[in-house]
Amino acid sequence: MTNTVLLAEDDRAIRQALERALTLEGYRVTAVPDGIEALAAIHRERPDVVVLDVMMPGVDGLQVCRVLRAEGDRTPVLMLTARVETADRIEGLDAGADDYVAKPFEIEEVFARLRALLRRAAPAEPAAPEDTAIDGVLEVADLRLDSSARRVWRGGTELELTRTEFDLLELLARNAGIVLDHTTIYARIWGYDFGPGSKNLAVYIGYLRRKVDPEGRAPLIHTVRGVGYSLREE
């Protein structure tokens, strides 16, 4: 089945180049120049994935994403941004985006990230017989993760996670006590290793920590410098 993409980018040259490239890659693309048209197009026909430029006149990409999430629309969102500071990336994640690509970008990176988002959005396969989770529930200390319902609690408080945050936390929980290296995490979550210079994983881990390990709680997410990350009770 052909996947559908809603592309919102105000730069005409970038929009047309991306539309051509995505079409050649096999996607059915609806391309619009601003946030207002993006929301209208999404409301007419929900796409499989949304690609949003952050900085558009009027209603920008962050506002579009906030509207979708407020409406309960969980369509995967990939942000295109020239703003590469950590605070800017966190703002996009906080708006409900699932992933981002910094400009200028290689088109193959965009393709890889879209493939990963679409894989995660696909219906989950039945758990393998050796899966040790009971009824899809994973528990580490006072953290409880329901894989089938895609819900997470720390103590008695439910956590609001984006799609990527949930996938990352689930991966760590299924391997509790094991140190997962950067390459493994990139391959399992994004389907692509973005190289040693990428800060993508560190940004998501940092943002996940703000929700899972708030002040006053014993930290569960641990960094093993030069190797990767582990979810475990101290």
Image: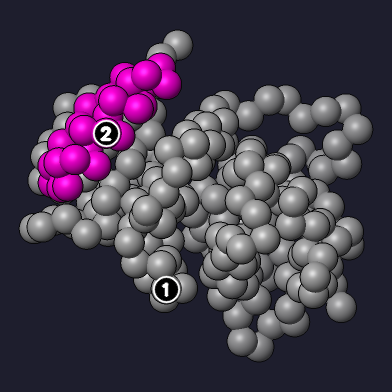
Whichever of labels 2 and 1 marks the residue nearer the N terminus, that label is: 2
Residue depth check, mark 2 versus mark 1: number of the one nearer the observer: 2
Q: Is residue 176 left or right of residue 121?
A: right
Q: Quadrant of residue 207?
A: bottom right
Question: What secondary structure is found at the residue carrying circle 2?
Answer: helix
Going by the numbered disc 2, the residue's amino acid type is Ala
Q: Is residue 63 above or below residue 24?
A: below
Q: Residues in magenta?
A: 10-34
Question: What secondary structure is found at the residue carrying circle 1?
Answer: loop
**Badge 1: how crowded within 10 Å, few (<14), some, or many (20+)?**
few
Which residue is at 10% across, 57% downward?
A: 57
Q: Quadrant of residue 77?
A: top left
Residue 128 place in picture, x, y as percent: 83, 28
Residue 31 place in picture, x, y as percent: 20, 32
* Residue underneath mark 2: 17
* Residue underneath mark 1: 85
Q: Quadrant of residue 66?
A: bottom left
**Quarter containing the N terminus:** top left
Q: Is residue 217 left or right of residue 179?
A: left
Which residue is at 77% across, 65% downward?
A: 229
Which residue is at 16% across, 55% downward?
A: 56
- Looking at this view, name the residue that lies furthest to the top: 1
**Quarter containing the C terminus:** bottom right
**How has the structure been colored for display?**
one colour
Q: Is residue 226 above or below residue 41?
A: below
Q: Nearer the viewer, residue 140 or 53?
A: 53
Query: Mark 2 and 1 residues: CB-CB less than 8 Å, in contact?
Result: no
